Amino acid sequence: MTEIKNIFCVGRNYVLHARELNNAVPDSPMFFSKPTHAAVTANGQTIALPGDEGSLHYEAEWVIHIGRAYQPGLHPEELIDGMALGIDFTLRDVQSRLKQKGHPWLRAKGFRNSAVLTRFIPFPGLDTCMKTDFSLRINGVEVQRGNISKMLFDTQTLLDFCARNFGLGSGDILFTGTPQGVGEVNDGDTFTLKWGPDILGECTVSLKEHGGRL
Ligand code: ZN
């Protein structure tokens, strides 16, 4: 896998997704992060995820890889050197309990294998990305389709916000939020992530073996 330094993620960055979970639309980007131990590349294998902690949801997302140190004024085309698609796996019941208590989301979002990534491809530029849909199929049926032109906060805003608050440099990746259509993961589901017509990655999940890593 491409070396990863930090995994930043953005919540509620598509209006229709915020609404499907009855969440308010944020007025500034909502960031969280995952440990690098959460990252795993989908290359056709079976990936173990927790099956005994309530509802587990998939969230398909556009992921960007940063190729150089951030400086104010640099544009996405100068900062981003690769892109992938990812699945931000989320323990939804755990997340709801944490939200009620005002606790951090780490337990719901940061577990091992919760940041599934396809292979990275060279960054094709924002114009091309805004003309290319990404999609997620489960067992051959499309369940999510998104386009980054629909993001609430655009790429430049996310990069500037991230850099200002947390720092941003070579090796960092950003999960940029999920479009509508999130839902339940079932044991044995096969997930296929597509960029336009191209399959970038695929994996099957096991909900029975998370304790002992596959
Ligand atoms: Zn997400």
Image (spheres, grey):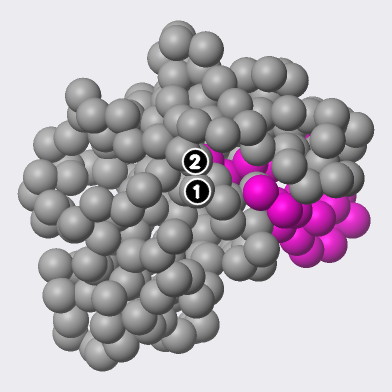
Instruction: Give the Cα separation between the discs numbered 1 and 2.
Output: 4 Å
Front residue of this view, candidates 35 and 10: 35
User: Is 184 left, or right, of 194 in this rendering?
Assistant: right
Q: Do the residues under discs 1 and 2 have CB atoms within 8 angstroms?
A: yes
| Left or right, residue 86 beside residue 103 | left
Mark 2, other Cα within 10 Å: few <14 / some 14–19 / many ≥20: many
Q: Cβ(mark 2) to ligand 1 < 8 Å?
A: no
Task: Please name the residue shown 13% across and 52% down the image.
Answer: 124
167 sits to left or right of 69 = right
Q: Residue at x 17, y 45 (%)?
A: 129
What amino acid type should be assigned to the residue bearing mark 2? Ala
Residue 205: % across, % down:
66, 29
Q: Secondary structure at mark 1?
A: strand
Is residue 214 in sight in this rendering? yes
Residue 91 covered by magenta stretch: yes
Label drawn at residue 12? none
Q: Position of residue 153 (x, y in %)?
A: 35, 56
Residue 141 % position (x, y): 45, 9
Write the start and end of the magenta stretch as one range: 87-113
Nearer to us in this view, 49 or 24? 49
Q: Residues within 10 Å of mark 1 (few under 14, many from 20)?
A: many
139 above or below 37? above
